[in-house]
Structures are given as structure tokens and as C-alpha cells.
Amino acid sequence: MQIQNPHDKIFKETFSNVDVAKDFITHFLPLSVRNTVDVTSIQPQKDSFVSRDLQEYFSDLLFQTKIHQKPAYVYFLFEHKSYNDYYTSLQLLRYMVEIWETKRDNKDKKKLPLIMPIVLYPGNADWYAGASFSNLLEGYQDFPQELQKYVPDYEFFLYDVSDYEDEDTQLNVFLRIILMVFRDIRKRDVQVVLNTIYRAVDYLRQLQDQRTATEYLETLFYYIFRVHRHLTKNQYYDIINHIGNTYQEGSELAMTLAEIFRNEGKEVGRAEGKEEGRAEGRVEGQAEALSNAAIRLITKFVAPLSEGIKTKIREQEISTLETIIDHIDELETIEDVKQYLK
């Protein structure tokens, strides 16, 4: 079973909310730009322009609106790689051209709509690629202006999520949650991650529409344990218990989250481990990939491992590592793990 990309799922579930898109445009675009965008006319479009082979790295959403009282579009591209892509401006240009291609067939209009391109970047490393297409063109800055005018160029608005500060309480709750989660989810300081999760839970608990809040919490929880690899099973269950004790329908919600954690999480873990192993190809590389996957899974679903046990796991044969991954849901203690180690 192909598991849905968690980045794509939570990004689209959050930003397809028109109020979230409006709040982002209103609070984060440069003042000179946001004053020209008619946020009252924003309507989400169903089209996606990210090819299937790039869905692992990008998610996108398109909104129809007006800019300077003219029909226009705002295009959100979420780049969720752990590093920034030097060719993002080229990729984004390709998507914008595809949008224009779809609008070209309108026989009533000879002009193409303006597109405001926005890139959200999770801030795992400094953005060094720039935000203009001309940065990719060899020697462009040295071209005389007479030559530059014959060469296409544009800029996109880049928002580095690492710049987000929690104090901005005017924002839509879902936007506040997604920005701080995108900012913190890959941090190695587990306490920072836990604080962000508990803060997100508290924000959702205060919403009047608890049905929407609990549905979003399930998506958020799924995203967190798919992306963050350093939280242990005990820490996950501490979060689940906290939710059970603070939500009005806590016991039922806690059971749902626990079920998601047990079933989805382990299925994801198996898929990740085996996929890494196949990707490596050579026996030595496959064994290394599977041992790393097994260590991650045991840490997450059983308990943290000592360096001695990690070394022992790395010495195992591929068949043993695959068995550990396949039976991860049956392991309760480190002693259970040791029974598989030769």
C-alpha cells in the first residue's frame, strides 16, 4: 500500500482553508504586495501542477483572486525537502507556465492572468539559492541592460518558516499551528518538539468547532510521528494521555490516536526500512540501511538503545533485520529485541 505523503496531506489540509490562505497573505507578504491582493475574492482551485515523481519534495495549492482589480492567481509551493533546492525557481517557473497553458484556451481573453508565486520553506538549512530566476543564469548580472531585457526573469516570495515567532496571536489557529510545527518538527531537541506539540494541542482544544479540531489533530499526529524520528513510544503515549485528559471527548480521541500510532506508524516503519534497503542495492548497503531502519523503529516503538545494542544490530544479517522490522509491533522490551540478535 502506498502511504500518502504526510507533508502533502497536512499542507493541503491546512492551506486549502481559505481563512488560512487569507491570513498568510495578509500577515506575511510585503505590504506593497498584499495591499494589491483582493483577499475577499480568494477561491481555491483544484488543480495541482506538481508531477507525481516530485510529490515527495513539493506540494502546491492554487488560489484564484484579483490583483489590482484584475483576474489573477496566488500559487503556494511548499518545498518540504530537508535541504533547499537550487533549482526551485526553475521548477516554479515550469508550474506557472502550466497554469498559463490551462488559461490560454479561454477564447474570450487574450491576456494571461498574473500569478503571485509563494514558496514556503521549512528552514532546515539556510536558503542560499536566492529567489529570482536570473540567479540560475550564468553571468546574467554582468549582462548589459540591452541584453538582459531579452532574457526572462522573475522573483518568487520566499517565506522561511524558521523565522516564524509564536507571539503572532492574530493569526488563524491552524496557520499558527502549521508554521510552528513546520519550524520545529525536525529539531533534535526533543523537548522543543514536545513543547510545540502540547502548544498545538492546547490551541485546538480552545476552538469552538471541536469536530474540526479533532479531525485536524488526527492529521497533525499522523504527520508528527511520520516526520520526527527521535520521539520514543513512551513520549508518544504521554502525548496521547495528555490529549485524553484535556479534551472533552478525550478517551475516545486518545484511543483513536493510539490506534493510528500502533497501526499506521508500524506500517510506515516497515515500508521505510524495506524501501531504504532496496534503494541501496548492494548487500552491504542494504544491510546498513535496514539496520538503521531497525534502530529507528526499536527506538520509537520499544525503547532507546545503548550503543552496544546498536552495534550488535548493525552486525546482523539482512534476514534477521527484516524479521525485526516485520515483528516490531510484537516487541515490548529490549529483552525481546535481544532474542533476535545472534
Image (tube, rainbow, N blue to C red):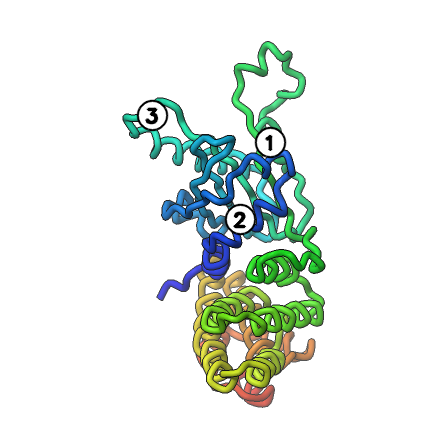
User: In the image, what residue type sits under mark 3?
Assistant: Lys
Indicate which disc, 3 or 1, sits on the residue closer to the N terminus.
Answer: 3
Residue located farthest toward the top when viewing the structure as drawn: 146
Disc 3 target residue: 109
What residue appears at the point 44 percent right and 37 percent down from the top-left corner?
A: 95
Question: Of helix, strand and loop, which one carries label 1?
Answer: loop
Quarter of the picture holding the N terminus = bottom left
Question: Of helix, strand and loop, which one carries label 2?
Answer: helix
User: From where the camera sits, is residue 165 visible?
Assistant: yes
Pick the residue in front: 289 or 317.
289
What residue appears at the point 64 percent right and 73 percent down from the top-left corner?
A: 198
Pick the residue in front: 206 or 195.
206
Disc 2 target residue: 22
Quarter of the picture holding the C terminus = bottom right
Question: Of helix, strand and loop, which one carries label 3?
Answer: loop
Residue 62 locus on image (x, y percent): 44, 44
Residue 128 locus on image (x, y percent): 67, 40
User: In the image, what residue type sits under mark 1?
Assistant: Ser
The residues bearing labels 2 and 1 have C-alpha atoms spaced at a distance of: 24 Å
Mark 1, Cα crowd under 10 Å, few <14 / some 14-19 / many 20+, is some
The residues bearing labels 2 and 3 have C-alpha atoms spaced at a distance of: 27 Å
Pick the residue in front: 298 or 253.
253
Q: Do the residues labelled 3 and 1 touch (CB within 8 Å)?
A: no
Disc 1 target residue: 132
Dividing the picture into quarters, in which one does residue 171 lie?
A: bottom right
